[in-house]
Every structure is written in C-alpha cells, then in structure tokens.
Amino acid sequence: MPQTVYNQSAMKAFVITGIISAAVTGLLLYLAQQSADADLGRVIRITKSSSPVAGDEELGRGWWEQQQFDQFVQRHGWGNIHLNVKTVVGDYLQKYVASAVAGEAPDIVQLEPQELAHWYDQGLLEPLDRYVQKWDAYRDGHLNETVLNAGRGVNGELLCLPFQLHGPAMFGIRRHWLEYLNLKKPETWEQAFEVWRAFTFDDPDGNGKDDTYGYVMEMRTDRGQHAGAMQVFFYAAGVRWFGADAQGRVRPAFNRPAAADALDLIKRAYQQGLFGKDVMLRNDEGGDVQRFLSQRNAGMTSQIYPNFYKGEALRHGMYDKVDLIAFLWKDEQYRRKDIYGTPTFLSGPRCMLKSSRDKDTAWKFFEYWLSRDALTQAYSKRGNARERYIGRFGLYTPAAPWLPMRNDIPITAKIEPWIEKLARPLDRYIVTQPFVATWSQISSTISQVFVDYYLDRFPNAQAALDEAERRAVGIMEKYEAELAGKGAEAQ
C-alpha cells in the first residue's frame, strides 16, 4: 500500500522550528476565543492528509463522519459536542503551522508512521495511555492488544490508535507454471532460488519464447523501494531494521550475518538474471504485486496481503492462476527454531495533539471512532459504492479487515476461507515498522548501498552492511543533533 513519504530537507527543518511556538500561539488564541464561542458548544477539530485528487476542502467522507458523530453524541448523552473534519493536501506540517498561528489548529491528526515519528520528536503528540486505561472497552478486554501495541513509540508510549492492522505479507506463485514444470511450492530460500531458475530458463508457459523470469524484485532506491522489498527476507531471518542500544537509543539493528545471507541470495539471483532483464531499468508506478498480476511474465512475488489479494487478483484475471505461500523460511534450521517474521502496516493511525484545547473532549472522538457501534457500521459497509455493488461480479471487491482494533464486532466482508486458513498462522510473526522519523532517508540510502553490492561495488555483503549501518547511524545522529539544537534555541 502506498505510504506518505516524509523527506528530510533544509526547508522542512526550517518550517518545523516554528511548530512548537506556533502551537502555543494557537492554543492561546483558542482560549481567547472560547468564551465568545461558548454557545456553539465544544468542537473537536480533526485534520487528515489527502492526495491532490481529493482536493483541499471538506470532503463528503468528512461530512458523513460529522453526521455520524453527532448522532452518536445524542444517543450517548454527551451534551453539546461537535466534530469538524478538515482534509488537506500538500505540506502537512506547514499547513499545521499556519492553522496554529490562525488559532485553528486541530485537536486530532491522522498521520503516516514516519510523519507520526517526526511530530512526536517535536513534542507535538499527547500520549494516549492514561485515556485508554480508563476506557471501558480496554478494561473489558475488547481491544486487540497486537493492534493497540502497534501504536506505541520506541519508548513504549501509546502515540496513536490505529483503525486496524492489515494482514501479514505473503508470497504469490504461478500455479500453472509449477504444474507444467512438475515443481512443488518452495518452503525455503534455496528451494525458491531453484524455482526462480526454472521459471526463468525452462519455458514455464510453454510458448517457446524467452519471455519469463523467476521473481519480481524491486531495485529502485529513490524512495527506499528496495529496502521495502528486502523486508520479507530480513524479517524471515530474524533481522529487524532497528533496536535499542545500551543507552536506550533507537539505532540500526540490521547488520547481522543473516542479513548478509539475504543479500547474497539476492545478488546470486540478480547476476543469473532471475529478476528479469530490465530489473534495474523499471520505472513504472506499480508495486511488486501490481507488476506480477498485470504483466504476467514473472513466476513469484512477495508483499501479497490476504485481505487485499482477492480483489486485486480478480481485477487482473489471475485469481485462479496464482497460489499463495505463507512461509518462506531461511532454511530448515530456522524452521526448527521457529525463527520467522513478516511485515504488515497500520491503517489510519490518529493522534491527539498536546496543543488540543480540551483533551478530555478530544478523547471522546476516539471513543466514538473505535466504538462497537461505529466499527460495526464501518465493517458492514466496507468500500465505496463501486466496490460494494460491482464487487458482486468479481470486480473492485472491498478489502476485508484482518486485525481490527476491537475483537467484539461482527464483520460482513469476509476473507476467502482458504486464504484465511493459510495466513492466520502468520499473525504471531507480524513485525510492525518502528516509528522512526528518518526512515525515508535511511531506507533510500541503504537501498542504494545494497544495489551497489549487487553491482560489485563492495567486496562482500558484510562490507555493504557495514557501510549501510554507518550511513544510517550518521543520518540519525544528524537528525538528533538538529533536534537538540532546536531545543536549546527554544530555551
């Protein structure tokens, strides 16, 4: 799924320096206006980012959410509380600064993980632990702890509440190609490598042409795409991008022997042409799964999420042509030791700002948004009109939820039983990305180092990992020094 990418730059750094003071200014303006606006009741302001296609105005979905909130407030006797939803495009931080100066700063924001980390580092986010602990849904055991904990920062504070966690990443493989070549689905890296070779050189589609290859591998680096593609291999080998050092600081943790093995696997496959002849030249906008389903000349891919797969595969006429693989172990030893991991991602994480005029009132939105009533309605009407109605004919089918925040809600949109049976065992191996503000820059940098290794610009995988770690640490230390400098200036 696409994610908002936060690019570090001098201009962004300059804009961010005014955030804290602007938030304070906005808070004072709000307090000054409260007495004049008392007859309007309490208003919770929410800001969400959107694509340029949606526009920089109140959208229909925001209006609908406001109406639903008003009805919920009336049913629960919360008094005169209203919701104001604003959708913006462009530089989210810059527009936040402008709204704070104008006295119109939001109480709640919806952020992508990298944005969230940066806002937290600037001291803008209000931890939600004390509110959740008093919430009936939490005390009664109705919240999914896995989803809840995915909203925690590196220091354990609850920084956001996500709507849900999407399903764990799986692999897809061409069923008829396996049958034609009399091959079995691979279960380990080496077995996969041999299947990729067969798909590349043994004419798996039987047309007598050299027009197939083994595996869809993303080699682009400008937005960290290759690092994203490597997650399925790193996580499967027990490697994580980040961890805590002796001082409790978040630091890169990927420089491990198992990561070197993963890089060697990918280099061997690249040098033998198992990723296709144009792997270093591809520049289409589609991701791995889109390319796999639409172009139909690759034998295997990763990053297939069980709650999205059916709709995408049907749309491309590939649903009956692809099998799914849940586990691709590093080797038999890792299987015996039960070492595995697979990526997933959050959906719609929302945060409360420290500058909120009335935090107890702002919290009411979370109680509504993640209430049993609201989620039951949301999950019984998943998708837009196109998805709900055309989806009946196999096109644009809505994505079913995988791990919702609440575990006590009925779900109408169901995942195919065979897919769910295959994917559910992966839940305990799910790895969520830590909230690291510099991940965009780090992922781009280490992607370039890894690709350079495949191109023989490093003597071995360990040298490439050492360089990737050195660059990642440098990026983090520079960012931390900038934060420290801004904190000193503020004092």
Image (cartoon, rainbow, N blue to C red):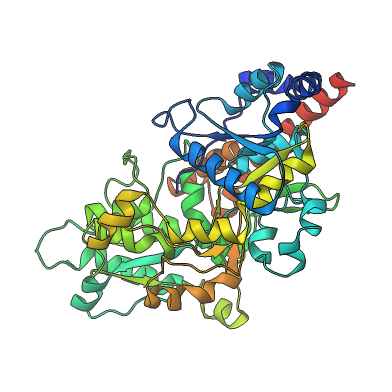
Residue in the foreground of this view, choosing between 88 and 230: 88
Residue that appears at 60% across and 73% down = 339
Furthest residue in direction bottom, as rendered: 336
User: Height in image: 349 above or below 418?
Assistant: above
Residue in the foreground of this view, choosing between 176 and 101: 101
Residue in the foreground of this view, choosing between 14 and 458: 14
On the image, the x and y values in percent for residue 299 come to: 28, 63
On the image, the x and y values in percent for residue 19 come to: 73, 23
Which quarter of the figure is the C terminus placed in?
top right
On the image, the x and y values in percent for residue 214 come to: 30, 62
- Can residue 466 be seen at all in this image of the molecule? no
- Can residue 375 be seen at all in this image of the molecule? yes
Residue 470's quadrant in the figure?
top right
Furthest residue in direction left, as rendered: 208
Residue that appears at 62% across and 55% down = 370
Residue 476's quadrant in the figure?
top right
Residue that appears at 74% across and 69% down = 140
Q: Please give left or right for residue 54 compared with residue 234 in the image.
A: left
Residue in the foreground of this view, choosing between 263 and 101: 101
Residue 206's quadrant in the figure?
bottom left
Q: What count of labels does the image hold? A: 0
Q: Please give left or right for residue 27 compared with residue 221 in the image.
A: right
On the image, the x and y values in percent for residue 36 come to: 76, 19
